Image (cartoon, helix red, strand yellow):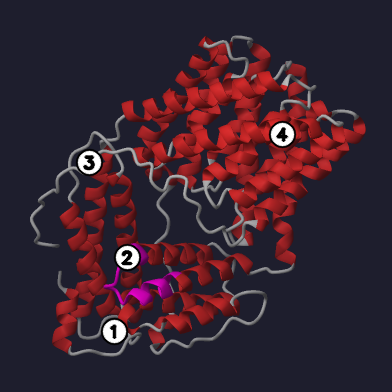
């Protein structure tokens, strides 16, 4: 274990950033997949209800259709399972909301139920890593349903409609498997190769190398998770695994990596052509074990307790504040608060700014579009489809830009039961957005997360243990190839989790100073050990034994 003294650095200055919050990023490489899928999932049920003259049921149909937004980065075997869980989760939240709406007319009770549902949805989505879009869509569906006129006799029919459209959304999302069965794994592997090439460009010491390295390891771990969640091993999967190993090796020794070759391999994974056979120089490299198994669900729920408390308190107070102001749709404030909560206070603040800006601009877009939407029921459906497509096209650029389309879509959905006065809708939406953002962020500040520092300590200990275990194997004259490979992977995972945990904790308030120096030392020694391990496996050119031993030490 590192002998560096546990000298914590001074707490960073607590500022609420504005620079860069609205900056646009590159669009997602698969932006068109959720965009086309959600349109394909919504359009048939919506036009069927239009033909039947029952547009008042579109809200329940869309509850299932919106499940088509999920799991597009997952391999198809895993996607099938995840989508089933998403549909069941959506039906569970919708069922609770509809039953509550049918049993009571008390707005205070309904807001309380909505806040508890939002907290449960947030924690389960974060713990199971379901996303994007995470809990926000589920919370939108359940919260809106709480304030829809309802009787107990109607609940089974509305749930059946949502289940049917959820099954249709499942089919829409699984359909691409017929054309490109290994598409998600190929994309994840290509992303890992590109990220490794970006780190190789820095030589491991250039400007921004720390961020590039963290991004590289994150992409590699995502690629392993994608490959390990597939079904039985195949020739394509084995070839992809070898490419991910190449990305790992480049991260371990960026100065010796060929960035151009990594990018060429990534480019060759487009389409359905054969996966390049890289051939690894060490026989043991064929014993690809992948990353350590994911932690059990219960162990991931504990650290999310502060986030659950923030969500429940913030959503409840936002809804109560909206009621106090006389707004007829307090669920808008509730959903705004639910959408804010991220891994730490700094990110929550950024999301609050993005939400307010996007919603205000979206209300102006609604003002411009509402005359077209009021031309007739078909025009209303077409406008909703256009905004649902636009939201998925834009949201990967920045959350606020996607909200510019989500806001008018949400306003138009309220009109399926009958046209409403546009000025009232716009005013209430803006007020609820501001109230939800202010109250929601205040709740995030009030509910402290002092466990963040404890998680950093645990991540440090895990990284030290993994490095020590790997170093002991390196010291053996003839370590088992599979044991060395497993140790290298576990160390890479531990270092990746350490960086993610440290970054998340750095954005929290009201906590003790973090051991930043120890984190940096642990990362440096861990990455030196990774490089030494790759050389021992024959994945890198050999170096002087004395230098290799030095590399393995902290």
**Quadrant housing the C terminus:** bottom left
Disc 1 marks which residue? 535
Q: Residue at x 77, y 18 (%)?
A: 153
Disc 3 marks which residue? 13
Q: Which tag, 4 or 3, sits closer to the chain's start?
A: 3
Q: Position of residue 107 (x, y in %)?
A: 58, 12
**Quadrant housing the N terminus:** bottom left
Q: Residue at x 67, y 57 (%)?
A: 32
Q: CA distance from mark 3 to mark 1?
A: 41 Å
Disc 2 marks which residue? 208
Dominant SS type (magenta): helix
Q: Nearer the viewer, residue 415 or 94?
A: 415
Disc 4 marks which residue? 368
Q: Residue at x 20, y 81 (%)?
A: 476
| Mark toward the viewer: 4 or 1 | 4
Q: Which tag, 2 or 1, sits closer to the chain's start?
A: 2
Q: Position of residue 383 (x, y in %)?
A: 77, 39
Residue 166: quadrant of the picture: top right
Residue 9 sits inside the magenta stretch: no
> Quick check: marks 2 and 3 in contact, CB under 8 Å?
no
Q: CA distance from mark 2 to mark 3?
A: 22 Å
Q: Is residue 550 left or right of residue 43?
A: left
Q: Nearer the viewer, residue 529 or 289?
A: 529
Residue 16: quadrant of the picture: top left
Q: Which residues are magenta?
A: 195-213
Q: Nearer the viewer, residue 95 or 506?
A: 506
Q: Secondary structure at mark 1?
A: helix
Q: CA distance from mark 2 to mark 4?
A: 43 Å
Q: Secondary structure at mark 2?
A: loop
Can residue 478 be seen in this snapshot? yes
């Amino acid at each position: 274990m590192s002998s560096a003294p546990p000298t914590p650095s001074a707490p960073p200055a607590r500022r609420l950033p504005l620079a860069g919050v609205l900056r646009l990023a590159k669009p997602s490489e698969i932006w068109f997949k959720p965009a086309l899928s959600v349109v394909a999932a919504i359009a048939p049920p919506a036009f069927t209800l239009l033909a039947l003259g029952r547009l008042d049921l579109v809200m329940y149909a869309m509850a299932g259709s919106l499940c088509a937004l999920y799991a597009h980065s997952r391999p198809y075997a895993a996607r099938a399972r995840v989508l089933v869980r998403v549909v069941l989760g959506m039906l569970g939240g919708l069922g609770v909301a509809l039953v509550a709406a049918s049993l009571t007319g008390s707005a205070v009770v309904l807001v309380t139920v909505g806040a508890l549902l939002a907290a449960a949805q947030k924690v389960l989505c974060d713990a199971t890593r379901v996303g994007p879009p995470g809990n926000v869509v589920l919370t939108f569906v359940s919260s809106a349903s709480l304030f829809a006129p309802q009787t107990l006799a109607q609940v089974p029919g509305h749930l059946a409609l949502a289940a049917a459209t959820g099954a249709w959304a499942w089919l829409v999302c699984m359909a691409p498997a017929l054309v490109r069965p290994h598409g998600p794994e190929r994309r994840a592997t290509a992303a890992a190769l590109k990220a490794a090439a970006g780190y190789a460009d820095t030589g491991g010491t250039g400007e921004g190398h720390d961020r590039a390295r963290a991004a590289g390891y994150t992409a590699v771990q995502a690629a392993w998770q994608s490959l390990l969640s597939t079904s039985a091993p195949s020739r394509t999967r084995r070839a992809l695994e070898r490419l991910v190993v190449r990305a790992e090796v480049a991260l371990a020794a960026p100065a010796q990596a060929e960035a151009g070759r990594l990018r060429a391999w990534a480019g060759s994974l487009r389409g359905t052509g054969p996966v390049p056979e890289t051939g690894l120089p060490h026989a043991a490299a064929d014993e690809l074990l992948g990353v350590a198994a994911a932690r059990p669900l219960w162990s991931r729920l504990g650290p999310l307790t502060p986030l659950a408390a923030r969500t429940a308190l913030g959503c409840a107070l936002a809804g109560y504040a909206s009621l106090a102001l006389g707004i007829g749709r307090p669920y808008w404030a509730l959903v705004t608060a639910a959408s804010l909560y991220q891994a730490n206070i700094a990110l929550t603040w950024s999301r609050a700014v993005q939400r307010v800006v996007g919603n205000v601009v979206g209300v102006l877009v609604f003002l411009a579009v509402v005359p077209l939407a009021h031309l007739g029921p078909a025009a209303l459906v077409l406008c909703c489809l256009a905004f649902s497509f636009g939201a998925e096209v834009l949201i990967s650029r920045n959350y606020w830009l996607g909200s510019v389309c989500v806001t008018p879509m949400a306003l138009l959905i309220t009109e399926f039961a009958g046209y409403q006065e546009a000025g009232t809708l716009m005013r209430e939406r803006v007020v609820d957005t501001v109230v939800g953002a202010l109250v929601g962020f205040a709740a995030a500040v009030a509910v402290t997360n002092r466990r963040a520092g404890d998680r950093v300590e645990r991540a440090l200990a895990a990284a030290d243990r993994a490095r020590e275990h790997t170093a002991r194997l390196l010291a053996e004259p003839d370590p088992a190839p599979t044991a060395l490979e497993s140790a290298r992977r576990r160390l890479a995972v531990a270092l990746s989790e350490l960086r993610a945990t440290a970054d998340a904790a750095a954005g929290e308030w009201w906590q003790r100073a973090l051991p930043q120096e120890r984190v940096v030392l642990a990362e440096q020694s861990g990455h030196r050990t990774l490089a030494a391990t790759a050389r021992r496996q024959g994945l890198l050119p050999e170096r002087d034994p004395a230098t290799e031993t030095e590399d393995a030490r902290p």
